[in-house]
């Protein structure tokens, strides 16, 4: 089981050393077994060899590349390494529309429930909570009336003020954008590791988006990341510093209860995708829910 998330800033060079990632920085060499690594986040001016890039894909290690503002802008993922990749893709293409609509209701419904729980935790007034709950109760398969979008507006405006927009250039958005990008990279790694095509979603169908399925499956984890950022970033940092970014990345290592067992968030994401696949194939009625309360409970 991989577990390391490696964050590299201003290293001189990354290269392959036997079955290890070798990091050269300030005259020192650091070795990390590739079999331990799930994600590498790289910032600044760093040289990297094609040999290590090749090994990243073979070990299903996702490489996250950040720009000069330290925001993730690119991913390197493995391609076709799942043992029954063609079979899995054929199954994915033939997923039933009715099943996709029902599963999307479950997925986005769990996201909304997590948003409601976080809003309760933050002491949002009862009137706004009632609006969010009523919108959740109106949720239909496929969410064609966009209850999710209406809940999101009430949710963010309740937490951060009526003038808040996700387009604002502010610390809250900077932290959430960074956190969501890390979530997206972690989920993309799991999706391709299961032999699935990232661009074929069950709800997201943007022809310009290569990660439609990833964006579908990560939705319930977004409010959990919001809670992590609220607790550990917004109360501690005024800017998205190096230490703040490390703290956001460390979210994936945090404990969470899932299927009555304590696992890391990264492991829960893997179990969640497996549960989703059983649901979409008809082996079970729905994917096992991912609850903010199970994250908060594991912290205690």
Image: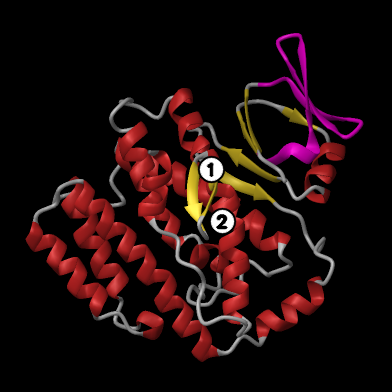
In the rendered structure, the answer to whether residue 32 lies left or right of residue 71 reads right
Picture coordinates of residue 215, whole percent (x, y): 50, 63
Q: What residue is pinned by disc 2?
A: 269
Residue 139 visible:
yes
The quadrant in which residue 235 appears is top left
Magenta span main SS: strand
Magenta stretch: includes residue 70: no
- Which mark is first along the chain, 2 or 1? 1
Extreme residue in the right direction:
18
Q: Is 299 displayed left or right of 207 in the figure?
A: left
Q: In the rendered structure, does residue 12 fall within the stretch colored magenta? A: yes
Examine the rendered structure and indicate whether residue 220 appears above or below residue 177: below
Looking at the image, the residue that sits furthest to the top is: 27
Side of 270 where 265 appears, left or right: left
Position in image of residue 118 (x %, y %): 27, 51
Question: Does the residue at mark 1 contact the one at mark 2 (Cβ under 8 Å)?
Answer: yes
Q: Count neighbours of disc 2 (C-alpha within 10 A) and say few if under 14, some if 14 to 19, many if 20 or more.
A: many
Percent x, y for residue 260? 50, 57
Q: Tell which of 227 and 149 is nearer to you.
A: 227
Report which residue position mark 1 lands on: 252
Name the secondary structure under disc 1: helix
Q: Which residue is drawn at 70% across and 61% down?
A: 192
Residue 221 point in image, percent of width and height: 44, 55
Whole-Å distance between the Cαs marked 1 and 2? 9 Å
Q: Which residues, given as a range, are shown in magenta?
A: 11-39
Element at badge 2? Answer: helix
Which residue is painted at 79% across and 49% down in the image? 57
């Amino acid at each position: 089981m991989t577990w390391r998330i490696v964050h590299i800033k201003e290293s001189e060079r990354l290269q392959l050393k036997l079955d290890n990632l070798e990091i050269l920085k300030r005259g020192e060499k650091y070795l990390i077994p590739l079999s331990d690594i799930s994600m590498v986040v790289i910032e600044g001016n760093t040289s990297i060899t094609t040999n290590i890039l090749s090994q990243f894909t073979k070990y299903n290690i996702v490489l996250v590349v950040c720009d000069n503002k330290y925001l993730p802008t690119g991913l390197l993922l493995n391609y076709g390494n799942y043992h029954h990749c063609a079979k899995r893709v054929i199954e994915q293409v033939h997923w039933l529309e009715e099943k996709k609509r029902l599963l999307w209701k479950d997925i986005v419904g769990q996201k909304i429930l997590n948003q409601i729980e976080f809003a309760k935790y933050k002491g949002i007034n009862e009137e706004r909570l009632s609006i969010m709950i009523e919108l959740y109760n109106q949720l239909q398969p496929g969410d064609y009336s966009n209850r999710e979008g209406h809940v999101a507006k009430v949710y963010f405006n309740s937490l951060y003020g009526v003038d808040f927009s996700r387009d604002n250039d502010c610390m809250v958005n900077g932290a959430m954008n960074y956190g969501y990008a890390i979530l997206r990279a972690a989920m993309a790694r799991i999706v391709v590791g299961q032999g699935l095509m990232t661009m074929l979603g069950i709800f997201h169908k943007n022809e310009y988006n290569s990660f439609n399925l990833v964006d579908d499956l990560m939705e319930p984890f977004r409010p959990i990341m919001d809670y992590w950022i609220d607790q550990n970033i917004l109360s501690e940092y005024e800017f998205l510093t190096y230490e703040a970014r490390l703290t956001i990345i460390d979210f994936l290592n945090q404990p969470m209860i899932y299927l009555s067992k304590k696992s890391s968030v990264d492991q829960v994401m893997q179990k969640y995708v497996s549960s989703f696949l059983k649901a979409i194939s008809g082996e079970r009625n729905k994917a096992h829910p991912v609850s903010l309360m199970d994250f908060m409970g594991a912290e205690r």
